[in-house]
Image (cartoon, grey):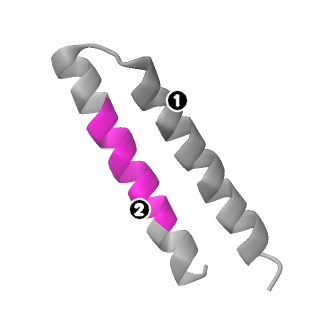
Amino acid sequence: MPTSAKTMTVCTVACLVAISAYSVALGANGWLWFAWVVLGLATVGVFATGGQR
């Protein structure tokens, strides 16, 4: 697994934990979840392009 893919995975998981905690404490925010989905798709894209090397 390339370093960039590992970094993106860690960031995606950390953001998921942070957004979940925010949602529990202050209520759900649709924009935060939308941003997390975009980050998740970017992570998948890094895996897709890095897997061809």
At label 1, counting other C-alpha atoms closer than 10 Å, the crowd grade (few under 14, some 14-19, many 20 or more) is few
Quarter of the image where one finds residue 42:
bottom right
Front-most of 34 and 2?
A: 34
**Residue at coordinates 40% horizontally, 58% vertically from top-left?**
11
At numbered mark 1, what does the secondary structure look like: helix, strand or loop?
helix
Where does the C terminus fall, quadrant-wise? Answer: bottom right
**Distance (Cα) linking label 2 and label 1:** 18 Å
Query: Could you tell me residue 39's position as x and y percent?
Result: 54, 48
- Most distant residue in the top direction: 27
Residue at (45% x, 52% y) in the render: 12
Query: What amino acid is at disc 1?
Result: Phe
What stretch of residues is rendered in magenta? Answer: 8-19
| Labels in figure, total | 2
Looking at the figure, which quarter contains the N terminus? bottom right
Q: Quadrant of residue 7?
A: bottom left
Q: Which residue in the rendered view is the most extreme toward the right?
A: 52
Identify residue for label 1: 34
In the image, residue 27 sits, relative to residue 8, either above or below, namely: above
Residue at 83% across, 79% down: 52
